[in-house]
Amino acid sequence: MTVKVTDATFDGVVTSERPVVIDFWAPWCGPCRVVGPVLEEIASELGDQVTIGKVNVDEHPALASRFGIQAIPQLLFFKDGAEKDRLVGAVPKREILKRLENLAG
């Protein structure tokens, strides 16, 4: 399951002890509609091993600005509250999983 992330909940979500992926997206973004189901699959497969959050940039422009998001979809990878990696665009599932494995270390 993915979680909807807001300005108010963002810091609480990314400080999780497990790896966190935050998907910056928008409903009008075609490539975002490709990445969304892939993230749902990963969330289902990995369960409690990972947290996947989604930030709608139209609803939360301050968060997008805070992280310098200028292109979507953009995935930010966090470990212990710190950003460790990011991917821009509709990337394949295997690339997302590879980045998560690197975080799990």
Image: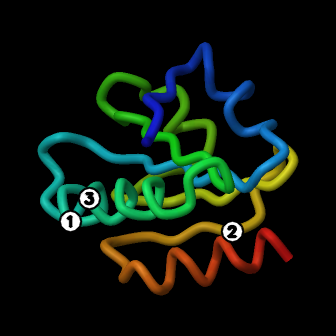
Q: Residue 54, relative to residue 5: is it above or below?
A: below
- Res 67 quadrant in image: top right
Q: Of callouts 3 and 2, which one flags the residue occurring earlier in the amino acid sequence?
A: 3
The disc placed on residue 16 is none
Answer left or right for 89 relative to 9.
left
Amino acid residing under circle 3 = Pro
> What is the crowding at mark 3: few (fewer than 14 residues within 10 Å), some, or many (at least 20)?
few
Looking at the image, the residue that sits furthest to the top is 8
**Residue at the spot 20% in from the left edge and 65% down from the top edge:** 34
Give above or below for 85 relative to 71: below
Assign the C terminus to one quadrant of the image: bottom right
| Mark 1, other Cα within 10 Å: few <14 / some 14–19 / many ≥20 | some
Q: Is residue 28 left or right of residue 93?
A: left
Between 23 and 37, the one lying in front of the other is 37
Q: Position of residue 4 (x, y in %)?
A: 43, 29
- 1 or 3: mark nearer the eye: 3
Q: Amino acid at mark 1?
A: Val
- Percent position of residue 39, x then y: 39, 59
Are dots 3 and 2 in contact, CB under 8 Å?
Answer: no
Helix, strand, or loop for circle 2?
strand
Q: Answer with left or right where residue 64 lies relative to residue 103.
A: left
Sooner in the amino-acid sequence: mark 1 or mark 2 = 1
Q: Please report contact status of discs 1 and 3: CB closer than 8 Å, yes or no.
A: yes
Give me the C-alpha separation between circle 1 and circle 2: 20 Å
In the image, residue 103 above or below residue 24: below
Q: Where does label 3 land, which residue? A: 37
Q: What's the amino acid at mark 2?
A: Asp
Distance CA(mark 1)–CA(mark 3): 6 Å
Question: What is the secondary structure assignment of the residue under circle 3?
Answer: helix
Residue 85 tag number: 2
Q: Secondary structure at mark 1?
A: helix
Instruction: Identify residue for label 1.
Output: 34
